[in-house]
Structures are given as C-alpha cells and as structure tokens.
Amino acid sequence: MIWEEAAILWRGETLSSYSMTLFATKDFRNSFYDGMFAHMFATLTGGLFLTGFAVYLGMNEFMIGILGAIPFTVTIFQLPTSYLLHKHGKRRRTAYLASAAARLTWIVILLFALFPVPNVSAKCVGILSLIFLSHAFASVSYVAWLSWTSDLVPEKIRGRFFGTRNMLCGAAGIAAILVFGRLLDYLKPGSYGLTLAFSITFVSAVAFGMLSLHYLNQIGEVPIDTSVDHVPFRKDLMLLLKDTNFRSFLGFTCLWNFSVYFASPFFTLYFLRDLNFSYGFVAVLAMISSLADLLGMGIWGKISDRVRNRAIIRVASWVVVFLPLAWATVSPGCVVMPVFLHLVGGSFWAGINLCMNNFLLGIAPRKNRGLYISFHNIAGGVGASIGPILAGFIVTSLIPEGLRFFSWSLLPLQIIFLTSTVLRCLSLQIFKYVREPGEVAAGQIVRTIRSVRGLNVANGFNNLLHPVLETSRNKSEPQSPSQDS
C-alpha cells in the first residue's frame, strides 16, 4: 500500500535513496511524469509566450492586465467543484476531463488567432474569452487534483514529494523555454515568422498536455474518507468561516496576491518593450529562474519537512518583496543585474510556492479539505485578478507617459513596480497573525540548513537523473508485484 511504502521512504537517510524509492512507487512516478508534461504545456501557454502572443496580437497594457487576471478570476468555479467532490467523489475523473478540455481549447484559440478578422479589438476580446474558458476548466481540474493528491501522499513526506515533483517540472519547463524561446527569435525576421512560431508553440503545448493526461490516468484513485459522518455543506461552510486562523490566512492570501500580481503580468512586457530584450534573452532569463527554482525546490522541500512551512514563508517573502523595486533600477543593455535577480527570485519563490501549498494542506482538516482549498484559491484569485486589471488601467489612463521627479524620470511600469513593493510589505503584516501546527521560529531554518546532510546544489541535478536511473534499474531487475492501490 502507498502508506506502507511511504513509511519506508520516511526512514531513508539520504535524499538520493529517498528519491529513488519515490520513482519505484508507480503512483508517485506517474505523478512526476504527469507534472513534467503538464508544466511544459503551462510554460508554452503562459509567461513569455503568452505575453509575446498578446503583443503580437496588438493588445495594450489594460488588455494584458486582464490577461494576467484571467487565471485567478476563474477560481470562483472551484467552490461548486469542491461541493460536488465533497458529495460525489470522482476526483481523478474530474481532474482528467477538466484538464483535457482546458488544453484542447488552445487549438480553438490558435485557429481564432489565425482567422482574419478586420476588427483587431474584436479578435483580442474573442481570444481573451477563449483563454478564460481554458483557465476555467483548469481551475476545476486543479482543486480536484490537489484534494486527490493530498490524500495520496502522506503528510510526513509531502514536502519532499512536492519538492521532487516541482524540481522535475522545472527541468521540463527549462527545456521548453530554451527550445521554443529560440524558435521565436529564429522565425521572427520573416514576414509570417511569428505566426508560424506561435502556431508551432501552441500545437506542441497541446501535445504535451495530452501526454500529461496519459500519465494522470495511470495514478490510482484514493476514495474520499467515508468513515467520517458528512455534515451538510452549509454547516461545513459555517465551520470554515468561524476558523479565525484560516480567515487570517485568507486575508493575507488576498492582499499578497493583489500586491504580487499588481506587477507580475507586466515584467515580460517591460523586458521586451522598455528594456528592449530579445525573445531569446528573455527565454534565457526564464531558464535561469526555472533552474534556480528547480534547485531551490529540493532544498526547501527537505527543510520544510524539518521546520514546517510558516518560517520558510516568512524568510523567503522578505526577499521577494524587494524584487520589483530592484527591477525598476535596471537599465537597457544591462545583463548582470537581470541574471542576478532571476537567480534570487527563482530560489526564494521556490520556497514560497512550495510552502504556501503545504501550509494550506496543513491547516485544512482532511474531511473537508476541498472546501478549504477552494476558499483559499478564491480569496487569492480575487486579489490576483483585481491587481493587474487596476495596474493596467492606471498605466493606460492615469500615467501613460510616466512621472518625473526632479531629475528622475519613471516609466509607467516602473511606477507599478514600486507600488507593488509597498503593497507586498503591507501584506506581510497580516501573516504575523497566522499560525501553523508544529511551527518553529524562523531562526531554526539556519540551524536546519547546517544540520541536514546532502543539502547541496549537486543534489538538485542528481534528482533529475533518477527517472533514467530508475528505468535502467527496472529493466535489469525482476519486478515485484505492484502495491500502489
């Protein structure tokens, strides 16, 4: 059984033996492969490629702000999804069908973009609507997948499991960024170069998404616990709203996401337009960030199993707070500073993204975890959807030419970055009131780093070889009966 194998994993002393055993577990291995191909789909339909696609279509800052808000406005669909999952189960089926719909919608998006429409604004609105539909399906899939996976993976090894999975996803994302980022620069000079480049990119993304679904469907379903008497949904909702610690976490999540995504969707636009970086260089920066994220996941995942999540979130957040301020000081032609900022940002965002997820799973009761996940995502979605829309409106309507203070001249997006820094500082004041079971002081992180064996950069690369090593080992050794149910 999964739980018996997980106990064996927990007793392992080294990161290497632990990860090798993870790959020997069929459900975990399929989850890793699913995540890698899913991340390649997400990479090619977001970030650099989505912003470049928006610029190619002629979208202004306000539309790009709406584009950045879409993934978060759709979180409202997670509430009815959690209710239906709470009542009927079928989490794997829900995740599979919703993911398939989200990915296949991109074929329609590409066809709509290629179809000649005289009114550019009408075309942009149509594409934004289709992207909204794709993300709506993805949002439904996510809440089903997270609830299902949180029951599949025991809590004691959850940090390491997601750390390893996210590292492998990061490696897959790096490969996609390198290949298709170079493709954009290579085909850009031709008259129809970008049209062909985006066509190849999005078709490939859908193909990777379909491969992801193949592995997702191989993971065993975990039945929802029926030993606990289920109370009416309305009563569950009231219990959730009376949870003061969770309410504080919702408030922090909403304001934090507002402050982060007030600036986040505009960084790629800033690189391409204001700093005049090429697609290839932006792709390299994204690769550096992903590489730092990949290595950071292995380190933060192991630390989080020792010190829990709250301390890591506090330490890492105070670093990423000042990243927008630093970007506002970067000048065109500068190379060293962008590389440094992506290294720092990728490393510390890895800890935040990993531990925010585990923090939520830790404070949410198991019997109605789907409901807690939905409310958390909705609260974060509200903040993350309002932020970029408001920022886009400010740039296009209030400060289209920027501002000037004495001899200093600030571009519109630089003002947005400075505002984001202030808002991030304010949101962290709320997190002081959120508690986690078994939390430790932030200073314990330093002592843990010193005491944990094998906590070095090389381990991040070693983990990437485990799928190959495990496949080779399986071919040369007799297979034992599967115990993944």
Image (cartoon, grey):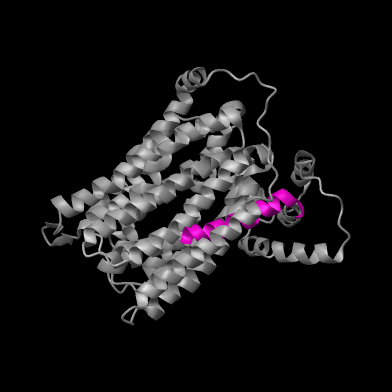
Q: Could you say which is closer to the camera, residue 14 or residue 92?
A: 92
Residue visible at 29% across and 65% down in the picture? 57
Residue 473 located within the stretch drawn in magenta: no
Q: Is there any visible trace of residue 174 in the rendered image?
A: yes
Total numbered labels placed on residues in the image: 0
Q: Could you say which is closer to the camera, residue 69 or residue 359?
A: 69
- Does 227 sit above or below residue 447? above
Residue visible at 49% across and 71% down in the picture? 178
Residue 38 located within the stretch drawn in magenta: yes
Q: Considering the image in quadrants, where does the C terminus appear?
A: top right
Residue visible at 55% across and 47% down in the picture? 97
Q: Is there any visible trace of residue 284 in the rendered image?
A: no
- Does 386 sit above or below residue 468? above
- Residue 60 coordinates in the image, percent (x, y): 23, 59
- Residue 404 coordinates in the image, percent (x, y): 12, 58
Q: Could you say which is closer to the camera, residue 179 or residue 412?
A: 179
Residue found at the very far bottom of the displayed protein = 190
- Residue 54 coordinates in the image, percent (x, y): 31, 62
In the rendered view, does 413 fall on the left or right side of 173? left
Q: Could you say which is closer to the camera, residue 287 or residue 233?
A: 233
Residue visible at 33% across and 82% down in the picture? 189
In the rendered view, does 58 fall on the left or right side of 260? left
| Highlighted range, magenta | 24-43
Q: Considering the image in quadrants, where does the N terminus appear?
A: top right
Main SS class of the magenta portion in the image: helix
In the rendered view, does 411 fall on the left or right side of 203? left
Residue found at the very far left of the displayed protein = 406
Where is residue 118, by image quadrant? Answer: bottom left
- Residue 316 coordinates in the image, percent (x, y): 47, 47
